[in-house]
Amino acid sequence: MSAKATPVRFGALSLLLLIVSIVLALLAVLALTTAHAASSMTERHVAYVDEVYVLEAQGQQWLARTDGALVDAQAEGSLSSLGAYLTDGAAVSGDTVSVTLGSAEALKLDIVLKVGADYRYTIESWKITREFPEDAAIGNLWQP
Amino acid sequence: MNDVFKQGERPTPDKANSRSRAFYLEVLLLLAGFAFVSVVIFQLFGSAYNLSVDATRTENALTSARNVAETFSASQDDASFEAALAGLPGFADVMREGSRVTLKTDTGLFVGVNLSAKPQSAGMMRSASITVFSGDTGEGEPLYSLESEAYESGRGVVA
């Protein structure tokens, strides 16, 4: 005749620890998800700033080339010859020079210069924009 | 658990010992299980904390680098750049040694800026290589780097 086994009992203490464990686990998952979202936002911010400053540098280099072209145009005495010196798809219209740098998919920099009678330029517009396609998915920020 | 004793009847010493052992074993198992779960949960909390601290530090480094880069773009030369940095809130101990400017931020970071200039056909291209380090010396871990350029026309600025 075998002895009757003592059953394992789940009392108030077990219940309390179970509830505490569940609540702690829930809070831990929420904390991790929030931290991950903050990290994702930081990564996106870093990527955006990197992109902006690369574009800014391109703009400054274009400005330097255009200033050089203005000196050459001044030597020729005609603003109409300016177009021959410009690169990057810059357009001359009257006394304004404009260009769009960057790509349509990413950020783009629109620059508009106004050229004075002394062939010196003033920056009329220096604008960085991004075009959002209407049906583009924003992405799941909260996904680990 | 469901041993029923008649009124006045006491459990035998053997039965009482068995119940006591079972109770202690149950509490021990329960606590061991809870300890294991706690370790896993606190590792999750630790990971979340580390991730959050890293993100905050990188964000602070990014903000400092941008502020320095914007100040560089707005300044006309190295001396005015240094003077402008010294007047900015959040920056301290601005020092310049040759073409290198260093400063500390109020978020506990160290910023090193290497300045250079390259002649162009009609002006000068000034460049700043900005690196933000953790800690308050330049020997910490590099957190973020930014390159900024500013063109200065040799023919003067149109008012």
Image: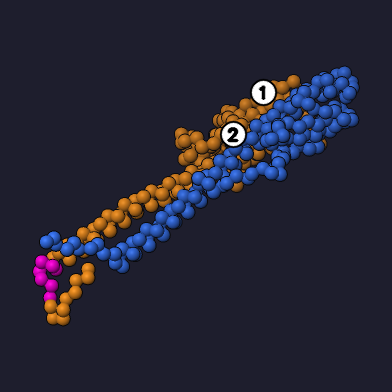
Q: Which residues are magenta?
A: B10-16
Q: Chain of mark 1?
A: B
Chain B: what color? orange
Q: State the colouring used for the structure image.
A: by chain
Residue occupying the point 10% across, 69% down: B13
Residue A22, horizontal then vertical, whole percent: 40, 58
Residue occupying the point 73% across, 31% down: A101
Chain A: what color? blue
Residue A47, horizontal then vertical, whole percent: 60, 37
Query: Which kind of residue does numbered mark 2 sit on?
Result: Leu
Query: Which of the two residues, B33 or B69, is positioned nearer the viewer here?
Result: B33
Query: Which kind of residue does numbered mark 1 sit on?
Result: Lys
Tell me the element at label 2. strand
Residue occupying the point 56% across, 47% down: A141
Tell me the element at label 1. strand
Query: Which of the two residues, A123 or A9, is positioned nearer the viewer here?
Result: A9
Up-down relation of residue B124 to residue A136 (above or below)? above
Q: Is residue A100 left or right of residue B42?
A: right
- Between disc 2 and disc 1, the foreground one is 2
Q: Is residue B17 left or right of residue B103?
A: left
How far apart in space, not on screen, are marks 2 and 1 (Cα)? 18 Å
Residue B16, horizontal then vertical, whole percent: 14, 68
Residue occupying the point 41% across, 49% down: B44
Check disc 1 and report the residue beneath it. Answer: B118
Badge 2 crowding class, 10 Å Cα cut-off, few under 14, some 14 to 19, many 20 or more, is some
Check disc 2 and report the residue beneath it. Answer: B146
- The answer as to whether the residues below labels 2 and 1 share one chain is yes
Dividing the picture into quadrants, the one containing residue A56 is top right
| Outermost bottom residue | B7
Q: Chain of mark 2?
A: B
